[in-house]
Amino acid sequence: MIEVQSLKKLFKKKVAVEDMNFYLEDGESVGLLGPNGAGKSTTISMISTLMPPTKGSVKYNGKDALKKPEELRKDLGVVPQEIALYEELSAYENMKFFGKIYGLTGKTLENKIQEVLALVGLIDRQKETVEAYSGGMKRRINMAVALMHNPKILIMDEPTVGIDPQSRNYILDMVRKLNREKEITILYTSHYMEEVEKLCDRVYIMDEGHVIASGTKDELKSILSNEETINIQVEETKATFTDLLFSQQGINQVMEDDLGYSLITTKGEQLLGEIFDYARQTNVKILGVHVQTPTLEDVFLHLTGRKLRD
Ligand SMILES: Nc1ncnc2c1ncn2[C@@H]1O[C@H](COP(=O)(O)OP(=O)(O)O)[C@@H](O)[C@H]1O
Ligand SMILES: [Mg+2]
């Protein structure tokens, strides 16, 4: 459906995206995972033809979508990171407004509004003004607007940032339903590994403007097929302990945060003895140790030495 080659975006001298290769096939649910500033929003702005790339091509069904964007735009629903709604209008009025822009009128428009409101679970609150809504409800209306013209592809830019857990779950379930039941192709960006893990078949991991890994979830995790993660919860981290962990053979990455350490290792449980010894030697109090099979977060940690949520 969509195929992107060697996409690049420069803002003055700042490289926001470089050498981005990407494809999206009919019916897929694809994730763009990366920390803040990775280049996710810039990438989807270019893919959705809202921002011209400095270099590279975007094709839709084999045709140049940068020269002739109409076909792609017609099939695309985009939910931007920023809420784009009229605050003083009700949800219903917003949807009517955007529906008319898409050329819907009369009964068709009315039916579509009610169908989409049902989908986002806001039928009974449609008469309230948007300013009275919670952040999560605004997001849902934002998504509803993007669905008004029956898009084949829905692109969402971090739709769950800063909203309550209940709305978040609602949105995740909704996205899954749109993909599985309505057969809408999904491109979902997030810096939450769990969301991408839950929703997406295929994933592109981005960092500092580059795709650093891509593939199905299993393919990505197989990068770490011989490795495990050990999470160590400590009362207080200490540089001397950290140094010992770094120097230990079989520990490939050491990441430190407020709660303790995450290690990526090929030796798993065999190292627990050493870890406890080092803690004793350096007077670090261990509160808990947990060995787990890798997640997408660990893949990112392995590739960059950093956590997604820096
Ligand atoms: N309009 C802009 N002008 C200058 N720099 C920008 C602009 N938009 C984004 N950037 C920079 O490009 C990089 C990628 O940003 P962005 O695509 O928003 O990342 P993400 O969505 O993954 O957080 C960041 O370093 C950001 O500061
Ligand atoms: Mg962004």
Image (cartoon, helix red, strand yellow):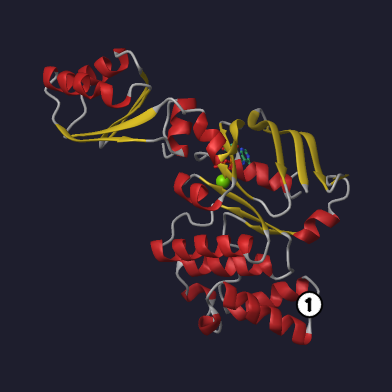
- In this orientation, which residue lies closer to the viewer: 132 or 155? 155
Q: Residue drawn 51% across and 31% down? A: 222
Q: Label 1 neighbourhood size at 10 Å, few (<14), some (14-19), many (20+)?
A: some
Report if residue 59 is visible in the image.
Answer: yes
Q: Position of residue 251 (x, y in %)?
A: 34, 19
Q: Nearer the viewer, residue 215 or 71?
A: 215
- Give coordinates of residue 297: x percent, y percent: 44, 37
Whether residue 153 sits left or right of residue 270 in the image: it is right
Q: Residue at x 52, y 68 (%)?
A: 138
Say whether residue 65 is left or right of residue 281.
right
Task: Report x, y in % for residue 9.
Answer: 70, 35
- Give the residue at mark 1: 104
The percent position of residue 146, horizontal first and vertical second, equals 66, 65
Residue at the far bottom: name it. 107
Q: Is residue 38 visible?
A: no
Per the image, label 1 sits on a secondary structure element best described as loop
Please give the count of numbered marks on the rendered protein. Answer: 1
Which quarter of the rendering shows the C terminus? top left
Q: Is residue 115 above or below residue 52?
A: below
Q: Residue at x 62, y 61 (%)?
A: 180
- Residue at position x 12%, y 21% from top? 280
Ligand 1 lies in which image quarter? top right
Residue type at mark 1 is Leu
Q: Nearer the viewer, residue 18 or 229?
A: 229
